[in-house]
Image: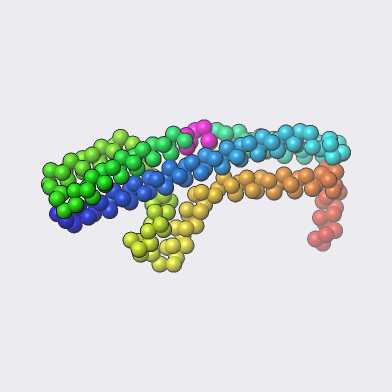
Amino acid sequence: MSDTITDFNRSLKATAGARFNAAKRLEHIDKRMTALTSFSSAYLILLSVGPSLMGASAASQPITNLFSTALSVLLLVSSVLSYASGHAVRSEQYRRSALEIQEIRRELRFAGDNVTQELFSTLSHRYDAVLQKYSINHDDVDFYRYQLQYPKEYIMNRFDRFEKSAKVFMAYSYPAMILLLLTGAVLLFTLFLIVWGGDAGRFLEWAALRFS
């Protein structure tokens, strides 16, 4: 019985920890996606007035329109994904389920060595009820982060640790990476307008001479 209780306690701890991580991850992504949408909107406004303020030639207009269209598509996609994903709602569900699981774990630990068959059965049924009540499961990266947080409980070699760390990093950072790439693209396009006035022909001639 003691081994069963120990395994149950470990399962409660891991599930609650992973779901807390899922809640934090979705909160983080929701903030970054909001920032991505906001910056994309700001860049669209800049593209609508920037070329004329910089004195770009008429040849730049088709390229500017193409770049603005691509940026509009990105803005639309990010807005739809943010709305459809429901990060804020799912994050709250993960947090509530983790809190309820932690409550079960506290009752189990409070009983100590006096856990009866009846109490164990009651807590086990309550745990199953919580999982059914919040019918969303955390992603693998949330459990990977939990494993990385408790390295003494999960023995991993260097490759496993690197692989899981990389997956966790990507799960948290992809909106920021998209925003970084977008900002770089806007800066390069602005430089293109300033130096070549939006004349693609002049740019291609320079590139041919530069790399020939």
Q: Residue at x 84, y 40 (%)?
A: 54
Residue sitting nearer the eye, 88 or 52: 88
Query: Magenta region's main secondary structure?
Result: helix
The spot of residue 162 in percent (x, y) is: 47, 62
Q: The magenta stretch spans which residues?
A: 82-87
106 or 144, nearer to the observer: 106
Q: How are the residues colored?
A: rainbow
Q: Position of residue 12 (x, y in %)?
A: 28, 48
Residue drawn at (48%, 54%) of the image: 167
Which residue lies at the image location 60% right of the left edge and 40% below the top edge?
35
Q: Is residue 53 visible?
A: yes
Residue lying at the far front of the rendered structure: 110
Q: Quadrant location of the N terminus?
A: bottom left
Vertical relation: 125 (above or below) 164: above
Check residue 155 for magenta coloring.
no
Give the image quarter of residue 53: top right
